[in-house]
Amino acid sequence: MQELHIALSSIADEGEHKQINNNDMAWDVLAKEHNLICKNINLTADVFLLPQSDKSVLIQGTLTGSLELPCVRCTEMFYYTINEKFDIYEEFEENEADKSEVLHKKQNTIYLDLQAVLWEQLALAIPFINLCTENCVGLCAICGAKKDDPACVCETEEGDTRLAILRKLKI
Ligand SMILES: [Zn+2]
Ligand SMILES: [Zn+2]
């Protein structure tokens, strides 16, 4: 396990590379905390930390891998590939209102929470509306099966012959 709370003062002036494996992160715990429904998160990160002062740092890197997300139309889980590049600047502020989410002060030492950084990047990489495929047909409101599932034989508006006749009527 890699230590993900890093004292800014411990980072070399010329910068430091960190390789974060999937097991270094408590992804499941984070997902629960943030109410993200997902499974099989498998992500690795390559991060370069470059201190800018004793209270600021540049964080550059990539977050790559995949996870499974539920489709908002059919609710089926589908694979989503993550390939997120980031380049962020974080500065510690004493002022509560301007406080960064990823920098914390403890006993006069400023710590970078790399776990929080990577979670933020994952949240940014996930689409706002998750669809298994762009034209997912969704679920049948009558039987609950996927609309293009042969098991669904429910009559929909387009399939209703009585309506078809009405459409042909000339007014
Ligand atoms: Zn779907
Ligand atoms: Zn149906």
Image (tube, rainbow, N blue to C red):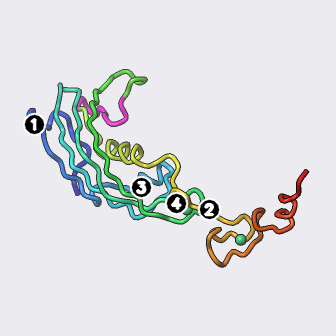
Q: Residue at x 31, y 51 (%)?
A: 83
What residue is shown with label 3?
Answer: 29
Marks 2,3: beta carbons within 8 A: no
Do the residues bearing badges 1 and 2 touch, measured as CB atoms within 8 Å?
Answer: no
Q: Nearer the viewer, residue 85 or 119?
A: 85
SS of the residue at dot 3? helix
Q: CA distance from mark 1 to mark 2?
A: 52 Å
Asked whether, in this view, residue 87 is left or right of residue 26, the answer is left
User: What residue would you read off at disc 2?
Assistant: 138
Dot 1 amino acid type: Ala
**Residue 118 image position (x, y, % from top left):** 32, 46
Closer mark to the observer between disc 4 and disc 3: 4
Name the amino acid type tagged 4: Pro
Earlier-in-chain disc, 1 versus 3? 1
Q: Quadrant of residue 76?
A: bottom right
| Residue type marked 2 | Gly
Residue 90: x, y in percent?
Answer: 28, 30
**Residue under the image location 26 percent in, 44 percent down:** 5
- SS assignment at label 1: loop
Residue 104 shown in magenta: yes
- 1 or 2: mark nearer the eye: 2
What label does residue 12 carry, if any?
1
Disc 2 under 8 Å from ligand 1? The reply is: yes
The x, y position of residue 3, in whole percent, is 22, 50
Q: Which residues are magenta?
A: 100-109
Beta carbon of the mark 4 residue lies under 8 A of ligand 1 = no
User: Which residue is most to the right?
Assistant: 171
Badge 4 crowding class, 10 Å Cα cut-off, few under 14, some 14 to 19, many 20 or more, is: some
Based on the displayed image, in which of its 4 quarters is residue 64 positioned?
A: bottom left
For marks 1 and 2 on the same chain, the one whose residue lies earlier in the sequence: 1
Q: Are marks 1 and 3 in contact (CB under 8 Å)?
A: no
